[in-house]
Image (cartoon, helix red, strand yellow):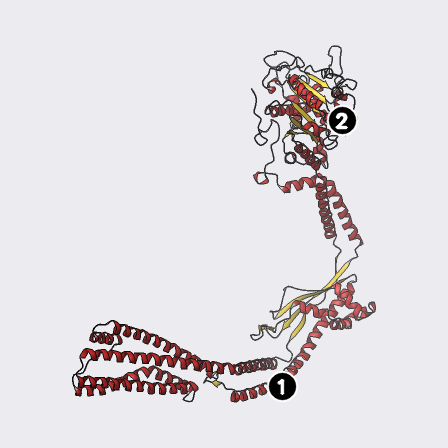
Amino acid sequence: MQVIPESESDRPTPVGAYPAPAPSWQGGKPETTDMLSAIWRYRWAVLIPTVIGFVCGLLLYLKTPETYQSSTRLMFESHRPAVIDTMTGDIVGGVPSVDILRSQLFSDSVVKRAFEDPHFEIFQDQFSGPGAFGGMSAGALRFQTDLQDGRMASSLVATLSFHGADPDLCEGAVEAYSAALQEMFAEKHRSSRGELIRLITVATDQLQPKMDLIEERYRKFRIEAPLVWNERGDATNPHRERQLYLTGRRSQLDEELRQKSVELTAIESIAREASDPLVGMSVIGQLVGKTFTLPQATQFNRDLRESDTELQQLQLDQKLVPLMIERNRYAAEFGDQHPTVKALDTELTVMKSELKRLITEQTQRILQLMEESRGQGVDPSVRAKESVDVILIASRAEVALLNEQISEIEAQIETEKKKAIEIAKFEQENMAILREMERNQALINQLDEQMARIELSEEDGGLQVTSLRAPGNAYRIGPNMAKMLTIGTLLGIAAGLGLALLLEKNANTFREPDEVVAAVGAPILTHVPFFKGKVRKSKIDNPNPFEELDPHLAVVHTPSSVPAEAIRSCRTSIFFELAGIQGGKILQVSSPLPGDGKSTISGNLACSIAQSGKRTLLIDCDLRRPQITNNFDSAEKQGLTDVLNGTCDHGDAIHDTPLATLKLMPSGPIPANPAEALSLPEMSELLDMLREEFDYIVLDTPPLLVVTDPSILASMVDGVVVALKIRRKSKPNVKEAATILRNVGARVLGIVINNSDESSASDGYRGYGYYRYARQTNRYYRNTPENGPMGGKVRTPVIVSGRGEMGQPVNGSPNPGSPNPVANITPAASRNGHASHDDTDES
């Protein structure tokens, strides 16, 4: 039955192999643990700088001279409480800030006063002058307070201290500086009060004349400027006010014109559409809110004429009422001589005269028509039609009058606008003069307020400095041995930690199996610990058929050892891997660099597969340094080179080994062109023929990063096993080797970590495998009454060779018919071995 090969992503993880690493958020190892491991790994790099730092701290303590310090307590009091000036926002009164006090302490005047103080007279010979004393004080004098900023406080307590090598000098300097501060602030207050009064007086004398000139200029400006000032003293532009009024009036006339136009349109439509003039006149009357009747007698007509005149006069007055109200309002606010009031009077007069003329003409025309109709006996319908015509004429006259008024007002608005723009500069000048007056008046008010405060303050007020505690005897403050040793040690530890992390980064090697899996993209098949080869000598009664084989073939010399068990674990994983490949028989073993133990792994792996009862062929394809050929003592025999050259048949180049199911094809003579020899078509044809004759074929090839030979063979085999020894700089080498295999399309079955326990000791690699349980290996037997107490005697275990060959020895005939390669795995025959090794000739 054929097995369909699976994709790389669908392949199950081999038995004994390590799966791909999980992300850190799924339980990966924390980075802090890796840093601690690196520090422990390079603990010598941390310890040496720590010791050096400790010694440097000790030497610094021994070389540092003794230092003494003397101090005193001073109180700074202000008789003026700290307040915030509402005008400027500055803090007035209170104690100055700590920075200001410290600056005054180190000023030249205070240093000179302290140097000339009687308490410091005996030490003046030690300095060339106040400058030298001030330079020393800059580093020795300390001024400290309990508050960070005492600007809002009315009192402040500070500590003044001086440290140096001479205790008497420290006491004298503290006393001198304390007296100098007290004297400076007392003198400063006496002189600053008089100087401040003088400055305020001078400023006031300069500002007041200037203020008088500004006020005089403003009075002249108000007389000459064409502006109008109201009762509140605010300047207004009369033309702008007139413009605003005319604009409002135009809006009112526009609305009235719109209403009259709508009314005229309706009257025209009724007159045009009505068939009965009487009905039309009645409808028009309802529309305009009036009642029209036809007179029947001369006396009634005369009375109607008189009534109509009075009625029209009342309507005229009613229309002019809003305009008269507005005129009276402006007259009350600005007076009868205001331009706006005069303009309204003119408008009222013109409107009254025009409306009276229209009313008179309209009334006379109606009476004329009525007289004619009475004399001629006109029909009432005709009179009604004539009345409608008269109404139309009056309505059109009203619309025309409104249009004329609007045109006239628009012309007035344009005129007022130009005049308002012309006198706008006077408004700006007025505002500028007022702002200047306000600024000068504010300055004068502030000066007056400051003068009042100074006059109220006491002559002996200001900032006073008093000594709360007399300067005490100088005491020793340094050097501090514990402090220096601690600083030196901490600096050494910091340097050591940095060096350890730098060495860890520079190592560029693997620390965890998961890192190897992530770099190669294949699982770890097993970890083979380091072992020292040991061959059992043959005896007459107990011959050793493997005595001539290389001592590092642990699976035949020490089959019960931990390295042999690791090889068998690798064999099991490979069986499962090749079972998923159709026709998978040929296995290549290579490594990134020489010294990784690939020949030892390939030899042991071939022997282990043969021990499972499979027909196995081991081919030494390393045509440059044929280590497998040397391990099986076949240097003089025909081999792979002879087959490729055609000097012998492939059957003649296959030789027997002490294991019945294991055959060997040595390298043969070393050719001058090994890479070209392996790329010949004969090599591919040879492998195809050997597939039919053997169950498994193991090829030992040179390192991947040294020559191109393994890259050529990787495309011909069914799977590649990479042997790796963890050491410095191994990470980039492994990644490059994996890249080479991917580029040629090779199928990497897994990685075998060789000398894993040695790598753990030297490079910090935390691998794990069967060797972790080595101390349990010799105990894993069933105790019986016969051999229970005899734990040290050699036992002969039972050989398990499968159902088809009951009792057949391990090195008997092969069993190619077994469907499952794992079922024919034979356990060890003895239990006195140790562990695996590296290829010493490849290191």
**Relative to residue 234, is residue 823 drawn left or right?**
right
Q: Position of residue 601 (x, y in %)?
A: 70, 25
* Residue at horizontal 68 percent and vertical 21 percent from the top: 685
> In the rendered structure, are the residues bearing label 1 and label 2 in contact, judged by CB atoms less than 8 Å apart?
no
Q: Nearer the viewer, residue 440 or 688?
A: 688
Residue at the far top: name it. Answer: 541
Residue 252 is situated, as x and y percent measured from the top left of the image, at 37, 77
Q: Secondary structure at mark 1?
A: helix
Q: Which corner quadrant of the image does residue 740 belong to?
A: top right
| Quadrant position of residue 85 | bottom right
Amino acid carrying mark 2 in the image: Pro
Picture layout, residue 774 above or below residue 421: above
Q: Is residue 290 visible?
A: no
The residue tagged 2 is 674
Quarter of the image where the C terminus is located: top right
Query: In the picture, which quadrant includes the N terminus?
Result: top right
Residue designated by label 1:
205
Q: Secondary structure at mark 2?
A: helix
Which sits in the foreground, 402 or 498? 402
